[in-house]
Amino acid sequence: MKISSWLITGIAFVITACGTKDAERASDARDRTTKPTASAKAASNVSMTAEQVAEEARGRVKCPAKIKSPARAKDAPVDDVVGVRPGMTYDEAANTVMCTNELLVVSPTRRHFSIQTYGQTVRQGFEARFAEPKVQKTSKEIMAEWQNSSIARASNRAVRDVKPGQAKWYVATMGIPGEERVISAAREEWFEEGAYPTVDSVQQALIAKYGTPTNADSGPQFRELRWAYDPRGRLITETSPLFHRCRGMANPDGATNFSPDCGVIVAAYIGAARTNPDLAEFIRVGALDGANGYEAITSTEQRLHAMELQRRAEETKAASKNAAAPTL
């Protein structure tokens, strides 16, 4: 059984006129310099810079992040994505993510697991993206963006939403309110244009961190690697019936599956540059704990159900003492 989730700067010109010709020349200069350029028009629309947006949204972030959750055992598989690993608390993970870049902003995810929460607010994860400047857009610009997105969706064309040099995250968490912990983490990073690493060097860096992959696949424009273990931490080999069942997910936008038969799974995807398949344009890495994630989801729903039954019982007991008698 599997469970899935789905300063605006201005320049002032002071001109002193000396005689008619000088005044005319000054007037001409004013005419030439006060006409707004395209960049000036764009700057005038910026109400907040990306740095200001990030500072306001992030609040007080102390780096490096303080982690009180137990570290993984020395002989356990490597299971973190840039420091974020299953078992960390929601706040520890969010702090760790924001400490990777001062422009990263964390927001609660809109994706949720199919569980009954009985009206309780369970933080089921968060997403993180780079802050963008707040720009005042015209209705024409907004309509053009909407039309472009609609065309892309209609043609089933992927829309890249990460700029070169930026990254995005999706971290899933589960637990009763206030006790949510990470069950999976995925990150996508696009390298700066002109500074692409080689695909081979990215692959070797992954192997240096996670070890020899359980499975590897490649094509003209990609390489995929996977490290999969059973719940006891044993490597899943190609002869195991779990080999094709415990696959993981590297894409932050992809569905994440949790199974009691699987342990730690790390998946990586290296996307090659279109103009040179030897160079890597982006990388995705995801990590999850299948069995513990499955247990966290099922036990959370069970605990929430027990809390709901207790609430009803207490409410019913109070009603038997304090409720008004009906008028008949």
Image: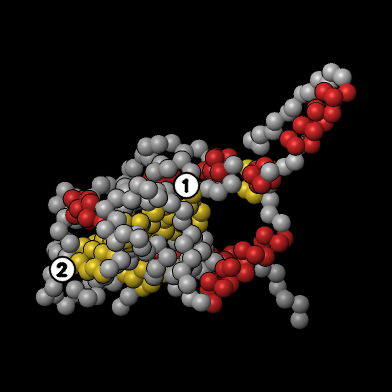
Residue 104's disc number: 1
309, 247: nearer the viewer: 247
Q: Report how far apart the C-alphas of labels 2 and 1 lie in the structure.
A: 35 Å
How far from the left and from the top, in percent, is residue 93? 39, 49
How far from the left and from the top, in percent, is residue 229? 19, 64
Q: Quadrant of the N terminus?
A: bottom left
Give the residue displayed 34% in from the left and 42% down from the top.
Answer: 67
Three-letter code, disc 2: Ile
Q: Label 2 neighbourhood size at 10 Å, few (<14), some (14-19), many (20+)?
A: many
Three-letter code, disc 1: Leu
Q: Quadrant of the C terminus?
A: bottom right
Mark 2: secondary structure: loop
32, 273: nearer the viewer: 32
Residue 137 showing in the rendered view: yes
Above or below for 188 versus 83: below
Residue 236's disc number: 2
How far from the left and from the top, in percent, is residue 210? 20, 54
164, 243: nearer the viewer: 164
